[in-house]
Amino acid sequence: MKLPLVVGVDGSGSSLEAVDWAVDEAARLGLPLRIVHASLWERYETGVPSFATGRPAEEVMADTIVAAGAERARLRRRDLDVTAGVVNEDAVSALLHAAREASALVTGSRGRGGIAGMLLGSVSLTVAARAVCPVIVVRGEKRNRQGGCGRVVVGVADPTQSSAAVRFALREAEARGCDLDAVRAWRRPAHEHVDHPLIVDDAAGVREEHALALLTDALAEAVREHPGTDVNRRTVEGPAHHVLQEASTHADLLVVGARRRHGHLGLQLGRVAHALLHHAACPVAVVPQRS
């Protein structure tokens, strides 16, 4: 039995964009879609009924939000297996619990109660940093969200920390029938000072070759499993978050890994993933790597 793709909704425009993205993704991968709305109306219900139904207004709102999300999904793809429900938890807990039985989790970039000017909602950020399954935060320009670039990008760190992200990215590129750009950033150490320009160029060349070797090593096994997908290997000098942010402008999806340390309960995201969730020009998939 295939695990569903789960998308969280809260009635915001951002969450509706997430529903659209999740519908297309579920159809591409042949997965059922589960729509989840978190509501604590029972805990905080004031006793004020809705004039039209006689039910608590908060309950009516919760049911309306999840029903609207399900209707939107069915209108977009009538042949898709869609289920929907209200969960009596806070949003973070509801999504983290749903992630335990999900192939991946999809959220919008900002919630209904988001503060103007915030780049990323706290729910999406927390879920991306703690979920046990891949989390896709749907953000960026319309062309990128709708697959208009024909390209998936994966940021590759050390081979032992990137295998899950690489496999996820290759699966995505294969399902979309597009190329995969595998990108590894490299930098010269700040303490590396030499006076002769030939020595500087030689040192840079050595570091770039080392970056390419690590990139090739990280891709080797997964690439063999997806022989029909074209993979473009790129090494770029610069801070990783700047390099990948630039790459995201021409991508339909940006994939990055996040280490999950066993027994650690706090946020486990990493500086690069954190920055990209705030600034990338396309949807970002954060794929947990167990260590």
Image (tube, rainbow, N blue to C red):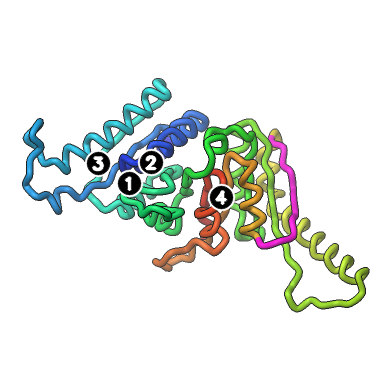
Kindly tell me whether residue 229 is visible in this rendering: yes
Task: Say which quadrant the N terminus sits in.
Answer: top left
- Using the image, tell me which numbered label, if any, was put on residue 280: 4
- Using the image, tell me which numbered label, if any, was put on residue 15: 2
Looking at the image, do the residues carrying marks 4 and 1 touch, with CB atoms under 8 Å apart?
no
Q: Is residue 257 above or below residue 34?
A: below
With 19 as the anchor, is 56 left or right in this view? left
Outermost front residue: 116
**Which range is magenta?**
229-239
What amino acid type is highlighted by mark number 2?
Answer: Ser
| Residue under the point 43% across and 33% down | 20
Q: Main secondary structure of the magenta part?
A: strand
What percent of the width, then of the height, locates residue 56?
11, 41
What amino acid type is highlighted by mark number 4?
Answer: Ala
Q: Measure the alpha-carbon separation of dots 2 and 3.
A: 15 Å
Looking at the image, do the residues carrying marks 1 and 2 touch, with CB atoms under 8 Å apart?
yes
In the depicted view, which residue is nearer to us: 69 or 180? Answer: 69
What percent of the width, then of the height, locates residue 131?
42, 54
What amino acid type is highlighted by mark number 1?
Answer: Arg
| Residue under the point 34% across and 37% down | 35
Looking at the image, do the residues carrying marks 2 and 3 touch, with CB atoms under 8 Å apart?
no
